[in-house]
Image (tube, rainbow, N blue to C red):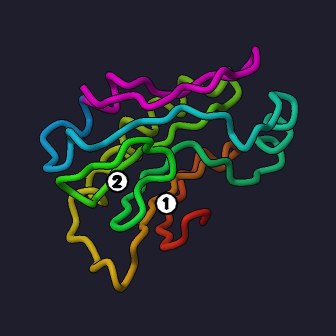
Amino acid sequence: MLRTDSKSPIAKGLSYPLGTQQISAALEGLDQYDEIEIVFQNNVDRSPVRLRELVKSGAPIRILSADHSITFGSVFQKRKVERDPDTWGISVFALPSEYKKDVRRILLDSGLPKVREWLSRERKQAEESPYEKIILDMIFPTGELTVRNSDYLFG
């Protein structure tokens, strides 16, 4: 099973759409499986009321991201890996509890397969991009899952 690095406490009315076991099962067999760490975190410290407002407005809400760092480590990895400079991480973001079931289904059906594909692809050289990230956002009124790649730490 993948390691959980941290799990932020969240406000009443928020939930995490997936747990470590579900993510672990979806990513089992990847070459870097034993190096991946999971972080469960608040969605940019937004309150349940603010998140619900954003959901209703149709704004994209981040629900999951995965990152790969070559030179300076994952933003949340505390220990240094001496044998391998590559670090891998997955962040799961809290969302209003009433959307948990639908988001879980979408992540299991299409989101985690996209993350698995992204983790499996050939990596860029450190000189080109020392940090890479895949970001999964949900537009709730339509149920649309958007996927984008970023070469920026806070992208």
Residue underneath mark 2: 114
Residue underneath mark 1: 147
Q: Is residue 34 above or below residue 4?
A: below
Residue most extreme to the top: 12
Residue most extreme to the bottom: 128
Q: Quadrant of the N terminus?
A: top left
Local SS, label 2: helix
Q: Is residue 6 above or below residue 62?
A: above
Q: Quadrant of the C terminus?
A: bottom right
**How far is disc 2 from disc 1 in space, using C-alphas?**
8 Å
Q: Is residue 128 above or below residue 41?
A: below
- Would residue 116 be counted in the magenta stretch? no
Q: Which residue is pictured at 80% across the width and 37% down the height?
A: 46
Local SS, label 1: strand
* Comes first in the chain, label 2 or label 1: 2
Q: Which residue is pictured at 43% across the width and 68% down the height?
A: 131
| Snapshot quadrant of residue 14 | top right
The image position of residue 66, as x and y in percent, is 42, 51
> Mark 2 near mark 1, Cβ–Cβ under 8 Å?
yes
| Snapshot quadrant of residue 73 | bottom left
Residue range corresponding to the magenta coloring? 1-24
The amino acid marked with disc number 1 is Val
Q: Is residue 51 left or right of residue 129?
A: right
The image position of residue 145, as x and y in percent, is 53, 51
The image position of residue 130, as x and y in percent, is 39, 73
The amino acid marked with disc number 2 is Lys
